[in-house]
Image (tube, rainbow, N blue to C red):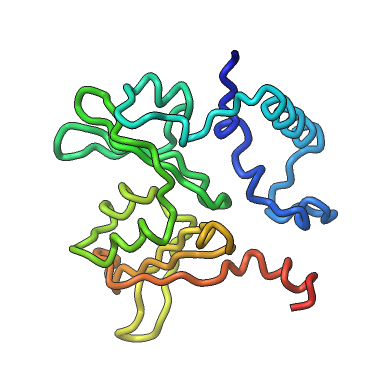
Amino acid sequence: MPNFRCFSLFPGFFSNTDLHRRRKTPFFSQPAAPRKVLCNMGLIALCATLGACATYRDVPPNSPKAVVLETMGSPNFTCPMADGGTRAIWTRQPNGQYAYGTRFNSAGIADRVESILTDENFRKLDKGVWTPQDVTCEFGPPAKVTRVGLGEKNEVVWEYRYKQANAWNSLMYVYLGRDGQQVTHHHPGPDPAYDYEFEIMGF
């Protein structure tokens, strides 16, 4: 049976809600062409019919690199590791809400492929010292980099767009101090990009 890599075929397609798709102008600034949308819908229907859509959950632990890439496609971000291995990340930032990661050892064997933009994974930031390089290699590049606060409270902030508890449209704010060199704290918050949805619903 053919192996359709649905994950890599339509980035961002699943991140829009029904409401966004019904709007005259799509939620994000670059609307998809109608032909592309119809093509994506056709591919989804085909995958559903054949039951052959492979996801990160279909990659067994300790899989060789070729098996991982067959399912996931090529990663769009990589980091070298101290042990000679490679950290590989498939991220949908800045507009998407999901990212997946694995670690290949020096022999090209992946430990496991997992969803990395989760509250549980972000709690890793509570322990130890995290540099910008450490954060990027764990979670991938952020959706946005800003500065907030006045005077001594002014800090560099990285924003990661994600689905909190796999349900809420959220941003994880990662603060890296005035000089942007070390994580000081982090917290989630509502994603203002979805405010329009709540206005329509009367909230």
Q: Which residue lies furthest to the top in this view?
A: 1
Residue drawn at (29%, 66%) of the image? 180
Q: Is residue 145 above or below residue 13?
A: below
Place of residue 126 in the rendered image (x, y in percent of width and height, measured from the top left): 27, 67
Q: Is residue 159 above or below residue 139?
A: below
**Corner quadrant of residue 156:** bottom left
22 vs 60, left or right, is right
88 vs 35, left or right, is left
Place of residue 81 in the rendered image (x, y in percent of width and height, measured from the top left): 21, 39
Q: In this view, does 5 lie above or below 16?
A: above
Residue drawn at (51%, 57%) of the image? 162
Q: Residue furthest left?
A: 83
Residue drawn at (40%, 49%) of the image? 116
On-image quarter of the C terminus = bottom right
**Corner quadrant of residue 48:** top right
Residue drawn at (46%, 46%) of the image? 99
Q: How many marks are shown on the rendered structure?
A: 0
Place of residue 105 in the rendered image (x, y in percent of width and height, measured from the top left): 22, 30
On-image quarter of the N terminus = top right
Place of residue 91 in the rendered image (x, y in percent of width and height, measured from the top left): 47, 43
**Corner quadrant of residue 147:** bottom left
Q: Residue furthest bottom?
A: 151
Q: In this view, does 26 lie above or below 87?
A: below
